[in-house]
Structure formats: C-alpha cells, structure tokens
Image (cartoon, rainbow, N blue to C red):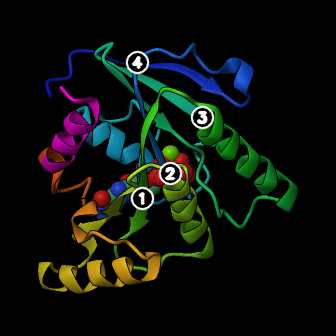
Amino acid sequence: MKVNKAELLITAVKQSQYPEEGPLEIALAGRSNVGKSSLINTLINRKNLARTSSKPGKTQTINFYNINDQFRFVDLPGYGYAKVSLKERKKWGKMIENYLVNRKTLAEVFLLVDIRHSPGEHDKVMYDWIKSFGFNGIVIATKADKISRGKQAKHISMLQRELGVENRELIIPFSATKKTNKDKIWNVIKEILMV
Ligand code: GTP
Ligand code: MG
C-alpha cells in the first residue's frame, strides 16, 4: 500500500478521548520495548512518527494514527514494564482492556513478541484475550535480525507452542532494521481491510 498520509490523530488515556469511530482500526499490543512503534514507522516509511525509545515504557497512552484516511493503527501502551508501580500497571491493563472490549471498529489485533524469547505471562493473557474477542490474532515476531535465519524456524515453533497458536502462518517474523516481511504484513493488512 502506498502511504501518502500518516498522522497522529490523538494520544488518549481514556475512552472519552478516543477519536470517533470511523475507519477500521488495527491495534498493536505487546510488552514494552518489543517494537510496536518501530513496526508502525517501518510500515509507513517514517523514521519516528511513532516515537520509539531504547528505554522501555515510551508509549504509555493509546495512540491513534490515521493512515491515508483509509484505516488507523492504534499503538497500545506496552505492558510488563517492571519499573512502573503496580497501580500504574493496573491502570494500563484497564486502559487496554477497555479499548479492546468496546471498540466496534477494531478489525484486528497484532500481538508483537520478541522472536528471541519465550512469551511472558502477559503475552499469553493478551493472546488469549485477543482470541476470545474473536480476532485471528496475528503474531509478529519482532527483532528477527537478532537471530540467524537458520534459527528462525525453531523460534517460531517455540512461539507457536507456548502461545498455543493453531496456524503457524499467523506468526510472521519481522525486523524493523532489515524490513524483513514488510510486504507480507502489508498484504495481511490489505486482507483485513479487504482492499
Ligand atoms: P513502548 O513504547 O515502550 O511500549 O515500546 P515499543 O514496543 O513501541 O518499542 P519501540 O518501537 O520503541 O522499540 C524499542 C527498541 O527496540 C528501540 O531501541 C528500537 O530501535 C528497537 N527495535 C525495534 N524493532 C527492532 C528490530 O526489528 N530490530 C532491532 N535490532 N531493534 C529493534
Ligand atoms: Mg512505543
């Protein structure tokens, strides 16, 4: 998809701040620092429209991005960042749940996990949530550049087993630095939007 327009619509912490429901939305969930903002930037060819940081916990709000007036990316706050108080973490959990449960225009949720590591408890809960709300749950295995190509299949199998993903095709290795599978993810998005 050719992206002519990409803009941050709003940074929301509560439902009253969400933009009105309009174009379909694709949400990105995953632990802090996994590469959610980097995925958005890579897909739309922008260096830092979605702010990235080597410090975890950069995105603490729900950020809505308008893409071509055609659909929206919704960058969810990263979970599992230990340096944040329990109270604060609970607040994030509620914020994410509230969005997932109530948003009628939410078309799909991408769960991002680091290809190198076993998914954490939060990832498993999030994946089960996504499935129970009736989404396919596309798993993006990020930072694929950090392991050799030869090891990728083994890591994908590990993710499939530990998250309980039925269809291996729903796990896509991705690298923001090498742009691995950028086109593949765009094809998935086009299928979701039926364009
Ligand atoms: P929060 O906003 O804290 O939830 O994090 P996030 O999931 O948005 O992660 P972000 O995109 O900010 O990336 C975190 C760090 O990982 C940054 O230093 C990125 O440059 C790095 N990073 C992201 N994707 C990749 C990747 O595919 N390969 C490598 N090597 N580094 C990556
Ligand atoms: Mg972020």
Is there any visible trace of residue 53 in the rendered image?
Answer: no
Q: Amino acid at mark 4?
A: Pro
Q: Residue at x 63, y 57 (%)?
A: 79
Q: CA distance from mark 2 to mark 4?
A: 19 Å
Q: Amino acid at mark 1?
A: Leu
Q: Determine contact: label 2, label 1, CB under 8 Å.
A: yes
Q: Determine contact: label 4, label 3, CB under 8 Å.
A: no
Q: Which residues are magenta?
A: 184-195
Residue on which disc 3 sits: 62
Quadrant position of the N terminus in the picture: top left
Q: Does mark 1 have its CB less than 8 Å from ligand 1?
A: yes
Is there any visible trace of residue 126 in the rendered image?
Answer: yes
Q: Is residue 115 left or right of residue 25?
A: left
Residue on which disc 1 sits: 112
Q: Does mark 2 have its CB less than 8 Å from ligand 1?
A: no
Q: Tag 3, which secondary structure?
A: strand
Residue on which disc 2 sits: 29
Q: Amino acid at mark 2?
A: Ala
Q: Residue at x 60, y 34 (%)?
A: 62
Check disc 4: other Cα within 10 Å, few if <14, some if 14-19, many if 20+.
some
Quadrant position of the C terminus in the picture: top left
